[in-house]
Amino acid sequence: MEQRAISRAGRKVSVVGLGTWQLGADWGEVSERDAMAVLDAAAESGVTFFDTADVYGDGRSEQLIAAYLRNRPDAGIMVATKMGRRAEQVPENYVLDNFRAWTDRSRENLGTDTLDLVQLHCPPTPVFSSGEVYDALDTLVDEERIAAYGVSVETCDEALAAIARPGTASVQIILNPFRLKPLERVLPAAREAGVAIIARVPLASGLLSGRYSTDTRFAPDDHRSYNRHGEAFDQGETFSGVDFAIGVEAAREFARFAPEGASSAQTALRWIIQQPGVTTVIPGARSPEQARANAAAATLPPLPEATLEAVRELYDRLIRAQVHHRW
């Protein structure tokens, strides 16, 4: 699989990675056996980037990745984790002592002395503009607790604030055919600065798979049931902030753009991969088949200009008014 550089981390990663929120059982129960099968299918398909967080299953996702890599030390996987969401979300908590404690916990969960990449996990907006925060992150690098750091953001303005800092290796941001705003300023700024872009929520919480109808119901412990209006965390994390019924309609139209032999989900991933400035995209998977299908999106030829224009038209007509002003 094509590898692209996270330049400030001195690493290259596969253009399709694996997001492991699901392995924490925050989208419904996932057994350890099934989790291992997903990780193995991804790695065998050429994936070299796993993204996790200390809050996914309160550490379960990190621990499962560690257990997998103990048996596959030669897999060449870069593991990115995230920190901060287990604490009260106030800027005052984003200080060096807490960073040390949080990364020590993740180091233990992941079974490593030095974490490959640690990202602030969508912290309060003022954190992104705090020099003391970046100084503390630089200290973690100096202490070899972490090899590099980045941020996960909700908004384009947060991304731009982080990109302006010389130590920021990566920005993780929601980007998909239903979330185009990052194309305007964030991706060009990241390219100019040499900051990697990690595209998350690439299938709009599954909407872009084309599998859902307005009658679809999700389990009570699935955030697609309980966070549609931002009840538990930022609304943009669930269906990319798109109203579910409108998203189902838009996904039905998007499915027509799929090349012969490709699924709607693979088409969405291919669209993301070819956006200038994207380093890797991190779809989740709940089965080995999903992991393999996601990885296969990297082998699709680039979508033609007519398809890119059709995606933009669909976004402008159905989605833009809902989400553009917020994120």
Image (tube, rainbow, N blue to C red):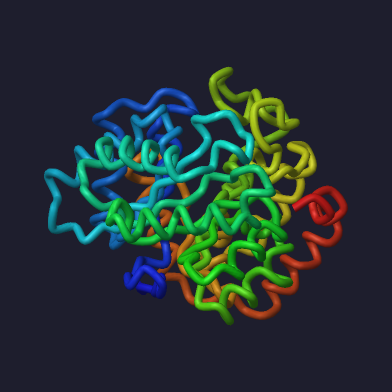
Nearest the camera: 141 or 225? 141
Residue 58 position in % (x across, y down):
41, 27
Residue 61 position in % (x across, y down):
35, 35
Q: Is residue 204 left or right of residue 326?
A: left
Q: Residue at x 51, y 58 (%)?
A: 134
Residue 201 position in % (x across, y down):
57, 49
| Number of marks | 0
Residue 263 in view, yes or no = no
Residue 323 position in % (x across, y down):
79, 50
Q: Is residue 203 left or right of residue 75?
A: right
Q: Quadrant of residue 181?
A: bottom right
Vertical arrangement, residue 102 with respect to residue 325, above or below: above
Q: Residue at x 53, y 45 (%)?
A: 121
Q: Quadrant of the N terminus?
A: bottom left
Vertical arrangement, residue 221 with respect to residue 23, above or below: above
Q: Residue at x 44, y 35 (%)?
A: 22
Q: Residue at x 32, y 35 (%)?
A: 105
Residue 5 in view, yes or no = yes
